[in-house]
Amino acid sequence: MLTVPRLPQTLAGVLGDLDEATVRVCVVSDRGAGPGGSAEQVRRVARLARRVARRLKREAKRQVTRRFTYETLPHDAAVRLSYEIMLGREPDPEGMRYFMENLASGGLKITEVPQAIRGSEEFQNFVRFSGSMLGFSIHAGRSQFIKSLPKASKIVDLGGTHLARPEGAMYWLGYPYEFSELTIIDLHPDERHAIYKAGLNPERVETDLGPVRYRYHSMTDLSAFADSSIDLVYSGQSIEHVTPDDGQIVLKEVFRILRPGGHVAIDTPNGRVTRIQQEAFIDPDHKVEYTYPELRDLLTGAGFAITSAKGLNLAQRSVTTGKFDIDEVAGHSGLYDEIEDCYILCVVARRPA
């Protein structure tokens, strides 16, 4: 005999929006299914009881999260939670004392505790991305690269669609300067590889830095831009999506549209390291993955002078041993001087004046 206790009268208050009819169906008296109850009835009651239990659990969680937020926590609990999330450890006595004193005096708001930890040397240098977070690690480093680019008024971004934001990748990666116009050149969504599908963006998007315009066609065609009319061209994770021959065409056109003294900035996977990672290209849409000497020669062959050559995600041990260590690469996010030992090449070149 299966016995399911009668649910309390206060159930409706606990569940809130739970359908009362469902509750009534699921409630079985203390007499259970009865001596004459069939096995199917017993199974049906058990299924309904489990369903109610799941809904009770979800509702309990919802009620708790409604009542308890980070800002409503006691100060010591908030500090402890911030340490656990940001640093993966319990707060040390000195750190706890510092935050508790500043929270009590009003020197810090409770919402500023995670921001303070974010600015610490420990978080910046010793809380590292794991191998499963390689993409996020690269993204964080690319943001640093974007912020280091020259100030420019007229910008062309080759392949710069953001899959979720109409302002584009360059804006969301943190380019800091106001511009008179940023034009994103990208393939029409119908012509992209499946992993890069996105909706069409408006022809013009207003941002606090300046207007962003879209043109949908190949980056090999820059005929819409007059000679010497652009200050900066950015190619972020895009030059590898065209063949080396088309890459030469792209850079020849970039050289033409840049004003004398204007810059081209490129970040792209480093073939020296990606070939250690695997024999095949790391992206099914890649047509090439350049080593630094190959990319340097491509740029200088188009007439550019290299002004900066850095790398993202240091892979020093992987290069030395010839065995790819994804935890090492993901864990060393940011810009490094040893470009050939990095997972991503970041190069800035100038059209001579």
Image (tube, rainbow, N blue to C red):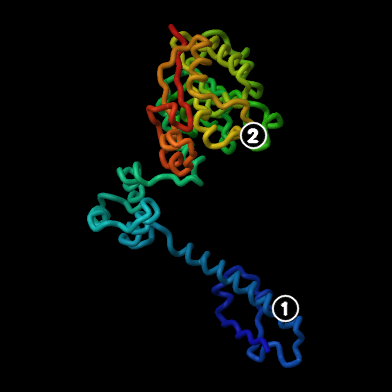
Question: Which badge, 2 or 1, comes first in the chain's sequence?
Answer: 1
Please state the horizontal and vertical placement of residue 264, each as a whole percent of the image.
49, 18
Which quadrant does the C terminus fall into? top left
* Residue 259 in the image: above or below residue 15: above
Give residue 242's quadrant in the image.
top right
Q: Residues within 10 Å of mark 1 (few under 14, many from 20)?
A: few
Identified at 51% across, 22% down, the residue is: 234
- Dot in front, 2 or 1: 2
Side of 344 relative to 93 (left or right): right
Q: Which residue is mark 2?
A: 284
* Residue at the extreme front of the image, as rendered: 321
Q: Amino acid at mark 1?
A: Arg
Identified at 62% across, 12% down, the residue is: 223
Which is nearer the eye, 39 or 282? Answer: 282
Which is nearer the eye, 340 or 148? Answer: 340
Please state the horizontal and vertical placement of residue 332, each as a whole percent of the image.
41, 39
Give the Cα distance between marks 2 and 1. Answer: 49 Å
Q: Which residue is mark 1?
A: 44
* Residue 58 in the image: above or below residue 217: below
Please state the horizontal and vertical placement of residue 120, each as a whole percent of the image.
30, 44
Please state the horizontal and vertical placement of residue 274, each as a whole percent of the image.
53, 33
Give residue 101's quadrant in the image.
bottom left
Q: Secondary structure at mark 1?
A: helix
Side of 177 relative to 92 (left or right): right
Identified at 43% across, 16% down, the residue is: 306
Residue 110 in view of the camera = yes
Which quadrant does the N terminus fall into? bottom right
Q: Amino acid at mark 2?
A: Pro
Give residue 70's quadrant in the image.
bottom left
